[in-house]
Image (cartoon, rainbow, N blue to C red):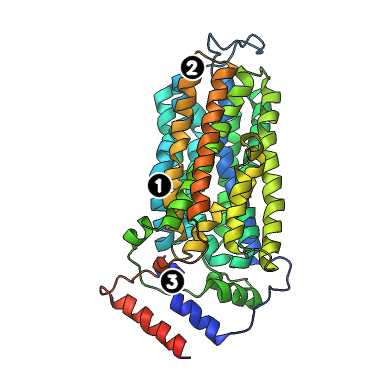
Amino acid sequence: MMSSIEDLVVTKAEYRQELVEDHQHVPRPKILWGARHTLALLGFLGFAVVYAMRVNLSVAIVAMVKPQPHDNTSDHDGDGGDFDWNGDTQGLVLGSFFYGYAVTNLMGGRAAEYVGPKLVYGMGVLLTSLFTILSPICAEFSAPLFITLRIFEGFTEGVTFPAMSFMLASWVPPNERAKLSSLVYAGAQFGTVVTLTASGWMCDSDFLGGWPSVFYVFGGLGVIWSIAWFCLAYNHPQLHPRISEEEKHYILHYCGNKRTKPVVLPWKAILTSMPVWAAVMGHLGSNWGFYTLLTELPTYLSNIQHFDMKSNGIRSGLPYLCNWLFSIIYSNLMDWLLVTKRLSILAVRKISNIIAMVVLCLAVGMNGAIFSGYMCSHQDLSPNLAGTLMGITNTVATLPGFISPSVTGALTDGNQTLSAWRTVFIIASVIYFICNTFYLVFISADVQPWNDPTPTTKEGEGEGEMVKKENVIKES
C-alpha cells in the first residue's frame, strides 16, 4: 500500500519549482465532468450515509423509549416505546457515539497520510455500516450493550472526516476548494435531511417493522456505497487509470506533485500556531450548537411541541434542508468571488463564519456557510497535513457530541418545559459567539511554514535540502 500511494507528501520548494517551470496560468479542463467530480460525488454520498447512521438514533429513540412521567406527553399516540430509559440514560445513549468518535480522529488523519485516504475512509464507512445493522439486536439485549456498540460506531466513523480532508488536499485545487469541498461535506446535511424525514415515517410503519428498520436500511445503504467507493475512488490523480491528461496536469499544477518518505510531525509548531487554534475554536463552537440540535431536536419537538412521529421527522429535517441548500448556493458564490479576485481566501473564511453564527435559529440553515469557512482552513494552513489538522480540530470539536446531550439531559430530565429548553439554546448561542469571535481574530489563509515537515531520514537533513531547493528557485 505504501509503494502504491507514494506516501503523498509535498514540499513547498517542489511546489514553487513547478510554478517556476510553468509560469502560465493553467485553465480548468474543458470537460464538464472529470475524475475530481466523481470523487466529490462519492464523498458527498459517503458523508450522506455516514450522517444517516449517526442521526437515525435521534428520531428512532423517540419511538424506542417510553414517555417519561413528567413529559406532558398526553398527545402522543400509542403507549410509547419498548425501553424504559430515563433522561440521563437517553443522554448517555445519544452521546455514546462521540466517545468513540473523539478517539480516532487524530489517528484517522495520520493513517490517511501513511496508508492512503481511500482505505481509511472506505473502511470507516463500511465498519460503521455493519455496526449499525447490529444496533436493534444490541438495544433489545441491554442498554449497556447498545451504548458499547454506539461507541464502536463512533470509533470507526471518527476516521472519515480527517481522511477526506487529506484526500481533498490532493484532488481539489485552491480555486475550486470552496465549491467542491463544500459539495462533499454538504453530504452530511443531505443525509441528515433524508434520515430525519424518512426515519419518522419508518418508525411509524408497521409494514417495515417500526424503529429497527431505521438501522437496517441505512446500514445496508452504507455497505452498498462502500462497494462503489472501493471500485471508483483513488488516492491521488497520478494513480487514477481513467483521468484525462488535461485534468491531471491541472490538478497537479495547483496541488503539487508527491514524494515518498514518511515525515515527522512538527507538533510544537502545530500546537503553538494561533491559526490552528482558531480553526479548533471555530470547529468547537459550530459543533456545540449543531450537535445540540442534531441529537435533541426530535426530542424537543416530541415533548414540548407534541408532534407525532411523521411530523416530527419532517420538521426535524427542514432546518438541515435549508442548511444543505444554502451550503450549495453559498459555496458557488464564494468560488466565483475567489476566481474573480473580488475577495481573498482569508476574507471568504472570515465572512463565512460570521454568517454561520448570526442567529442560532437561522444558523441551522445558514450554518452551511461553515463548509466554505473553517472546514476549508485545514487545507489552507497545511495541504500536506490537512488530515492531521482535521483530526486535531475534530477531536476537540467532538467533545460537544457527548457533553451537550448530557447537559441537555440534566437540564430537562423530569423537567420537559419550555424554560428548560430555552436554557439549552441560550448556552449553545453563547458558545457559538465566543468561539466564532476567536476564529475571526486569529485565523489565517496562508500556508504555514511547518507545512513542509522534515523527512524521517537524518535529523535536519530534510530541512537543509528544502532550504537548498528554495535557494535554487530564488536564483532562477
**Dot 1 corresponds to which residue?**
104
Viewer-side residue, 152 vs 257: 257
Picture residue at 41% right of the left edge, 39% below the top? 100
Can you say whether 312 is above or below 9 in the image? above
Sequence order check, earlier mark of 2 and 3: 3
Instruction: Give the image quarter of residue 246.
Output: bottom right
SS of the residue at dot 2? loop
Sequence order check, earlier mark of 3 and 1: 3
Tag 3 near tag 1, CB within 8 Å: no
**Dot 3 corresponds to which residue?**
6
Residue 470, image x and y in percent?
42, 82
Q: Is residue 177 visible?
A: yes
Residue 422, image x and y in percent?
57, 23
Q: Select label 2 or label 1 by which is in front.
A: 2
Q: Amino acid at mark 2?
A: Asp
How many badges with numbers are in the image? 3
Q: Amino acid at mark 1?
A: Thr
Q: Amino acid at mark 3?
A: Glu
SS of the residue at dot 3? helix
Picture residue at 69% right of the left edge, 29% below the top? 315
Q: Is residue 204 left or right of residue 408?
A: right
Badge 2 crowding class, 10 Å Cα cut-off, few under 14, some 14 to 19, many 20 or more, is: many
Q: Which mark is residue 413?
A: 2
Q: Select label 3 or label 1 by which is in front.
A: 1
Viewer-side residue, 108 vs 407: 407
Sequence order check, earlier mark of 2 and 1: 1
Tell me the quadrant of the picture where the N terminus can be found: bottom left
How far apart are labels 2 and 3 at the CA level?
53 Å
Tag 2 near tag 3, CB within 8 Å: no
Q: Is residue 284 left or right of residue 184?
A: left
Residue 156, image x and y in percent?
44, 44
Picture residue at 46% right of the left edge, 73% below the top? 258
